[in-house]
Amino acid sequence: MNQTSNELVLFFGRFHPLLVHLPIGFLVVAALMEVFALFKRFAALKQATEFVLFLAAGASVLAALFGYFLSLSGGYDQDLLAKHQWLGLAVAGLAVVAYVAKARKNQWVYAPSLMAGCVVLTLAGHFGGELTHGSTYLTEYMPAPVRNLVGLPPKAETTIAVTAAPSDPNQAVVFAHVVQPILKNKCENCHNANKQKGALRMDSYDYLSKGGENGPVFAKGKSVDSEMIKRCQLPEDNDDHMPPKGKPQLTKEELAILAWWIDQGGSADQKLADLPKTPAVETALKTVGFTLASSTSAGVAPRRAESEVYQKKLPAADATALLKLKALGILAQPVAEGSSLIRIQAGATPLKGLGTVFGDQQLALLAPLAQNIVWLDLGSTQVTDKGMAQLVSFPHLVRLHLQKTAVTDAGLAHLAKLPHLEYLNLYGTAVTDAGIGQLAPLQHLHSLYLWQTKVSTAGAKALRDKIPRINIDQGFQAPDSVRTKPEEKKKV
């Protein structure tokens, strides 16, 4: 087969996900028509069942053929793929048999083949879901009675896929707590245990280090020579660009973190405090929720006293609410191992199954966790001042990211009612001097980020006069950014 023919086969294979839904619909409809036809009122449905089965048989054969074409692209778990393929062929065969039996009015063959086709269809769909979405795709939210019926073990109350970060950011392990969450959200969909595009898995450090069919994907100490960085920097229309066009893309900050980690040796166990960081890297780390102690002429500044929120004994977080967030693609995890305090990262990509970016309406999903949420990242989402009014019911918020949102001065009036707020990122918002002036009651606020806002140096100084311990950062564009002086930090 020449290259043109091979590419044509792979092109048609890409239509398998579209075609595969046709036999599913037709077979189920045919079965339902037969059931309803048992009632006199719907007896006429029997006349149309044969045509529906004809469509089901044709669609199932095409779906199986195009599925085979798609499998030639590689990157799938072979055992799982084999199960899906054989079951898919069985569905096609049973659909054809059911159609022929119906046409010849052979009820003894027709009824069993139609019922068997629907059962096998369910199994084929299950394994297809595993290939695309992971091994727990169908069973993850299965109710306990159903799990018992099919012989599955009880489900753990909450599943947190990413290692929880320690309460002290300096003690965070760079790969486990910073790099892996980025890979999980942006890369693992195509590079996991069941689906390995390019024979590459990225769901653990060992697999990532092993590389794929073209060799290692990162060169320790050399991000410029690392394939995973080079591919992410290609134009999005390039066929080799990663993640593929249409998938959630890496932000420039996330890409900067990956490159920095590789340049520092790409280790599995290095801690944030152990690695040198440029101002650009520190800025990138802040966007993903890690603010480290600043350096002074006398060494590292002493750590600020930990918020009393971290010492509270709060009830366990609502497991059902956490699972709903996970299903939508929202990162929700404890701020420390074994803690009931929760960190939420909504993100700027469309939510799974909703097709819309997180906004004011979705804040209602967080209500069952209001007492537990201490870190909330709403950066680049569609939240507005209306949403800020809902945050008043989150009494234990310590860190809040609102960068690149539509929040204005009106929204800041609500934030002034959060007594434990210590960190607030307003980068790229339309807030002004008048707005940040409303934050004066927040005497625990020690980190405020105002890059690319309408806040003046004078406005920032005015707030600092009211909150002496605050560190206000107006970015590199403002040389006279207001920052807490080293000698003042020593007084804290």
Image: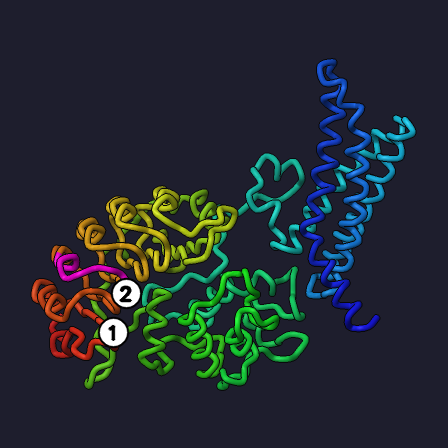
Badge 1 marks a residue whose secondary structure is: loop
> On the image, numbered disc 1 is attached to which residue?
475
Image quadrant where one finds the C terminus:
bottom left
The residue at 40%/44% (across/down) is 318
Mark 1 and 2 residues: CB-CB less than 8 Å, in contact? yes
Q: Is residue 276 above or below residue 86?
A: below
172 inside magenta stretch: no
Q: Is residue 409 above or below residue 210?
A: above
Q: Quadrant of residue 210?
A: bottom right
The residue at 40%/51% (across/down) is 358
Q: Which mark is residue 427?
A: 2
What is the distance, in whole Å, between disc 1 and disc 2 at their CAs? 9 Å
Does residue 425 appear in this view? no
The residues colored magenta run: 428-437
Does residue 154 appear in this view? yes
Q: Quadrant of residue 148?
A: top right
The residue at 21%/77% (across/down) is 301
